[in-house]
Amino acid sequence: MTVARLDREMGSAELTEWMAYARIEPFGEDRADLRAAIVAKTVADVSRRKGHAGYRIERFLAVRDGEAERRGSAESLMRALAGMGKNAGTD
């Protein structure tokens, strides 16, 4: 959907509701990337050799061109997502 079409079809009240919903129940590509990274890290950790401490989640996060600095670390992303749930009254 284009921005112009969105502007025609959705008022500011509905957009505000969607923004509030996204804070309670995050969705979109960044959230999907995090979910995939968690699964990949889990599989790698289960398959690691004996004595290996485990992998860091950053190793499995998809990073688009020039996005690493803007996005920040995986830990900061996970803290932000955890904070969203707490702000919404859910854990």
Image (cartoon, grey):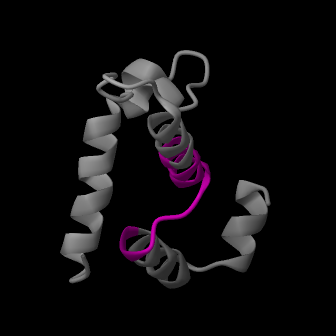
**Residue 74 placement (x, y as % from top left):** 35, 35
**Residue 15 placement (x, y as % from top left):** 53, 75
Residue 83 vs residue 35: left or right?
left
**Residue 16 placement (x, y as % from top left):** 44, 76
When asked about the image quadrant of residue 19, the answer is bottom left
Residue interval drawn in magenta: 23-38
Q: Residue at x 54, y 83 (%)?
A: 14
Foreground pick, 65 / 76: 76
Q: Residue furthest front?
A: 50
Q: Main structural element of the magenta stretch: helix, strand or loop?
A: helix
Q: Residue at x 39, y 28 (%)?
A: 55
Queried whether the magenta region covers residue 30, the answer comes back as: yes
Foreground pick, 22 / 38: 38
When asked about the image quadrant of residue 45, the answer is top left
**Looking at the image, is 55 positioned above or below residue 33?**
above
The quarter in which the N terminus is drawn is bottom right
Residue 13 vs residue 11: left or right?
left
The quarter in which the C terminus is drawn is bottom left
**Residue 48 placement (x, y as % from top left):** 47, 28
Q: Residue at x 48, y 83 (%)?
A: 13
Q: Residue at x 52, y 31 (%)?
A: 60
**Looking at the image, is 89 positioned above or below residue 66?**
below
Question: How many labels sit on residues?
Answer: 0
